[in-house]
Image: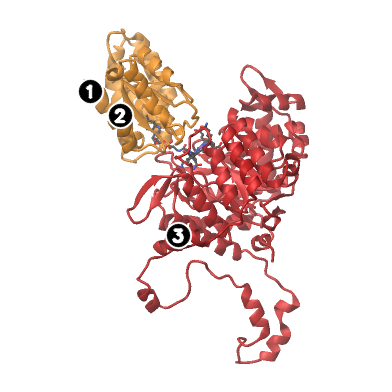
Chain colours: A orange, B red
Amino acid sequence: MDEKEVQKDLADAILSYDSVAAEKAAKAAIKMGMDPLNAIEKGLSPAIEDVGDKFEKMEIYLPELMLAADAMRTAMSLLLPLIPKDKAVSKGTVVIGTVQGDIHEIGKNIVSNMLMASGFNVEDLGVDVKTATFVEEAQKANAKIIGASALMSSTIGSQKDIIDYLTSMKIRKKHAVMVGGGPTTGQWSKEIGADGWGEDAATTVKLANKLIKRK
Amino acid sequence: MSFADRFRVMEPKDFMNDSDRKKIHDAALNVLETTGIKVHSSVARESLKRAGAVVDEDTNVVKCPADLVGALLKKIPSKIVLAGRTEEYDLPLDRRHQYHTTDGCGISVWNDETKTRRKSTLEDIRKTAVLGDWMPYLSIYEPMVVAHDISSKSHVLKGLETAMENTTKHIETESTTTPEEARAQVEMAAAVVGSKDELKERHYLSAMVCTVSPLILDEGATDAAMVWAENHVPVHITGMASMGLTGPATIAGSLVVNHVETMALACAMQAHEPGSPLLYGSVQSSMDPKTGAYNSGSPETILISIGNVEMAKFLDLPCSAGGIGGSSRIPGLRVSIENSVLCSPLITAGSEVMNGIGLADGSTLLSYEQMMLDHEIVGLAINSQKDIEVSDEAISLDLIKKVGIGRNYLSEMHTLKRVREFYLPTLWDMSSFESWVEGGKKDLFAAAGEKAEKIISSHMPEKLDASVSNKLKQIVKDF
Ligand code: B12
């Protein structure tokens, strides 16, 4: 097998939503001494972007997206540790969670998978996440973007809290904040001074792509 | 005819046989015994442990052996009465009546002239309560929106107070997420019926409590459920497992997940307070395969809700499964189509309480126009699910012979009396095209909105006693 074949296996594993095949292909790549960066950039990444495109065009459904993301994660978990720290492989880090007092997680999970599928490194903090935790974790992970989900009119206020907190710590410029979830609107996002609003997973990816390139 | 008689429907029809129901039930028992369910409420966990469940204190996972589940479920009253503020509005849950609630709890209100949304306020709760009080086919009022003009700390209580002031009908609360909120609402309901002891007998308030799918009982809502149980406030156990998302993508599979959650919360309540009333609730749905969105208007949603009714029958419990309330982002045609199709089969199956008059966009957007349309849909649906009376008087053999061949029945006493029983729509009539033109060519939606406004400004709900009003105010103030 040459490098091209293994790269194709990696891509095929993602495109057929197959974690087992992804693991096999990643191991094959490692065994033959392929540069892991090559495995990712020539094998996995184009495939997952393809999946993201198809989803955006509504050619495939959510389960395909989620399974492709799983396959991607499986292969990445084997390849990433072999890459020197100074070589960036992801587009950048997004710290995401559902705000304090709110346990709705479905939309947030979809968004976080779609971001991952599009090449972001995603740290999902889960639900009922305290304002301070969003900020602390974003700093720890050196995340360019914070994503806050809120599904209730009684909890969307916490999205503003995150922004106010960043401002009060004088690090507002360091992290772009994007907000989303049922009761939020573009108008609300402007009102609280967020950097963007994501109506659904596909628009959120576009937004994140824009935010990550900033400054 | 009493108020409840209006909602009497034909005997429920079976959509599943007992052997299939038992398969779902057995699968659920298997899950409850082997996988278990995560219970974040320490009160519920302790009660279940005392009753004999296996509790893992590190993970909060509770496993219940089948015989324990069976023994606890037996304690649930199979027939109860949801009480109105006055007895006139009492609603027996006896498998022969079908009731509808207003939907809760929206966050914005539709303006049809400008086609825009605005934030909901306390005044919207007042207005919908007055309108709901008037509506002949609304049985239960649920505070329909969040009052954004009230502090988030007390908006649930203030909403309940406003509801109690403005309608005599039974009230269901939906947004309670803490035991403290539940306790205060118990005080309020007790103030209306006389005392906490009386509240145990007269179930003037009931509460929707959601499980978290798959297989979780949340902390706040479940703690609140224990307070409801202590005070015999009936709990509508409302699982929401969505096919493909938080439950398997098949109806049978998602029924199992929901059945586990429903039985788990029911068992926790019975372990905590034996004999506390509850309803087998559920508003399950299918996800939109492309976005994961909550798709409350899909055919799968109808089928799975029917399945919920079937499982309630299997346990012989009061049932509040399914509900109307389209997922269309705006009110109007699509919501009305979805609601019309959804309503009747669930009544035929035997759901006793259905959620959902008046909100669009997945229960987030109040429209006064839609409220009127939904009410009409419900009126039509209930009245087309009545028993077909086959008494001698109804057969009217003598009359048929008397009228004989080729004449008509118009000027008969029998007709005069019986024609009164025909259903008359509240929103439209059979007047001519010309009169529609003369009336300004109004479309139904706009006409519905105008009628709603008229009723809200003219209908006078029966007032609460001043001393009760003061008590309610005090409880809300002290919270
Ligand atoms: C499923 C559900 C639940 C489930 C949640 C299960 C789970 N594991 O997440 C359960 C049953 C647990 C639940 C509980 C409650 N719920 Co609830 N729930 C819903 C429901 C029906 C669907 C939400 C959903 O999952 N939608 C599907 C996803 C895919 O859509 P989405 O979340 O909007 O996400 C999309 C976008 O918004 C965006 N997005 C999402 N997050 C993010 C984040 C970022 C950064 C970006 C950019 C974009 C983005 O992309 C997503 C993909 O397209 C909604 C009704 C509705 N129509 O939304 C009510 C709803 C949100 N719930 C409501 C209520 C009241 C409650 C409870 C208080 C009810 C109770 N009595 O117990 C509790 C609250 C508990 C708590 N403290 O949080 C209300 C809120 C009303 C309000 N005041 O605002 C709603 C609107 C229903 C209603 N009308 O009553 N709920």
Left or right of A5 on screen, residue B395: right
- Residue B41's x, y, as percent? 63, 26
Frontmost of labels 2 and 1 is: 2
First in residue order: circle 2 vs circle 1: 2
Chain of residue at mark 3? B
Residue at which label 1 appears: A214
Q: Is residue B340 above or below residue B61?
A: below
The image quadrant that residue B89 belongs to is bottom right
- Residue B113's x, y, as percent? 34, 56
Under circle 1, the secondary element is loop
Under circle 3, the secondary element is helix
Inspect the image, locate mark 1, and give the three-letter code of the amino acid beneath it.
Answer: Arg
Residue at the spot 37% in from the left edge and 10% down from the top edge: A81
Ligand 1 has an atom within 8 Å of the beta carbon of the residue at disc 1: no
Residue at the spot 29% in from the left edge and 11% down from the top edge: A35
Residue at which label 3 appears: B453
Residue at which label 2 appears: A193
Q: CA distance from mark 1 to mark 3?
A: 51 Å
Frontmost of labels 3 and 2 is: 3
Q: CA distance from mark 2 to mark 1?
A: 16 Å
What is the crowding at mark 3: few (fewer than 14 residues within 10 Å), some, or many (at least 20)?
some
The image quadrant that residue A36 belongs to is top left
What is the crowding at mark 2: few (fewer than 14 residues within 10 Å), some, or many (at least 20)?
some
Frontmost of labels 1 and 3 is: 3
What is the count of numbered marks?
Answer: 3
